[in-house]
Image: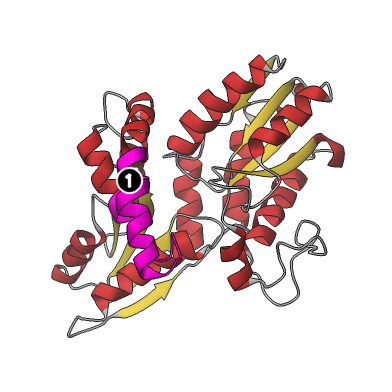
Amino acid sequence: MSKTAVLLINVGTPDKPQVKAVRRYLRQFLNDSRVIDLPWALQKILVNLIIVPFRAPKSTKLYQKLWNPAGSPLLTNMMELQKKLQNNTADNTGFFVAMRYQNPSIAKALQSIKQKQYDKIIILPLFPQYASSTSGTAIQAVWKHISKWNVIPKVETISQFYDHPAFIDAFARKINTYGPQHYDHVLFSYHGLPNRQLEKTHPGVAALSCHCAEEMPAHGNFCYKATCYQTTRQLAGRLGLAKDSYSTSFQSRLSKNWMAPFTDETLIKLVNNGQKRVLVVAPSFVADCLETTVEIAYEYKKMFIEKGGEKLTMVESLNADDEWAEAILKIIN
């Protein structure tokens, strides 16, 4: 009987919420040419001499807010998810987890897969919408190792799954538990990207004439902006939300030349328009992390209340939910 290995990959987490560990994580993360796509010399100077030295202490404080007694939620949820998947799958299928940056490493996971001589490998980056700086770099890192093997098994890649019915169903059920009908507005917030990275996949996407917010582009379905808006439309449709009761925004920007509208500015506009009870959903994240638990549920919530808002609730991500485990089995099949 043939054996299949499923490799689940997420972005990564520092080993500890300490400056040294965070610095090590940021160096690996930000020195990735798919994450900061600048000329090599400029990237190295910017990352290693400016960004990491100044950002590591600040980021450490944020990770300390995220950490719980069990460790990093991103990692603990992945490990729990792996156990659920393994317990509900035939013996000829093995599930492995890895982080693109830091631990558990892709190299270690692949070494285990190689030693157990699997006939087939399914690569599943846990990013619903494809982006070069997330799914792209994870897939590239896997192939960097596999390409050196003497025997290369059959390899399948799932580049994105934003429109898979099982993913939409799992997220919609999670949102429904929060009673979206009791809020003035539902805001779907996605991780933003620099406009220059969007342009590489879909030239002209940052222009005012772009229609990706209304429809999928005719040239293909790998435009990150378009897939985010399509995710919103599918979730809103599944939830039965009225068109004027929800919107889409983008968070975690590092400059004004990133994807807009920005989540923080959108929240201020909502409260100024009298929409003081807002439910926030982050469908580009399948596990809670710094961007959901701290950036939205802590920082944006604090800002929203200070601006006159009454209630801002962050919908917990899929994490290790049974419905999410079931959805992954459907996605890989």
Q: Secondary structure under badge 1? A: helix
Across and down, in percent, residue 305 comes to 65, 16
**Can residue 123 be spotted in the picture?**
no
Number of residue marks? 1
**Where on the picture, by quarter, is residue 44?**
bottom left
> Quick check: 200 above or below 91?
below
Q: Considering the whole magenta stretch, tell me its main secondary structure.
A: helix
How crowded is the residue under tag 1: few (<14 C-alpha within 10 Å), some, or many (20+)? many
Q: Give the x, y percent position of residue 329.
A: 45, 56
Relative side of 68 to 321, left or right: left
Q: Is residue 333 left or right of residue 77?
A: right
Q: Is residue 48 magenta?
A: yes
- The residue singled out by tag 1 in the image is 52
The three-letter code of the residue at mark 1 reads Val
Residue at image point 32% right, 75% down = 143
Residue drawn at the location 81% of the way across and 35% of the way down: 245
Residue 105: quarter of image: bottom left
In the image, which residues are magenta?
A: 27-55
Mark yes or no: residue 106 visible.
yes
Please name whichever residue, 321 or 52, is drawn nearer the observer in this view of the structure.
52
Residue placed most toward the observer, 333 or 127: 127
Q: Going by the picture, which residue comes out furthest to the bottom?
A: 150
Residue shown at 38% from the left, 52% from the top: 10
* 151 versus 110 height, above or below: below
The N terminus - image quarter: bottom left
- Residue 175: say if magenta: no
Q: Is residue 165 left or right of residue 109?
A: right
What x and y, as percent, mark residue 224?
61, 61
Q: How is the image coloured?
A: secondary structure
Given residues 49 and 132, the one toward you in this image is 49
Residue drawn 23% across the image and 32% down it: 18
270 lies above or below 318: above
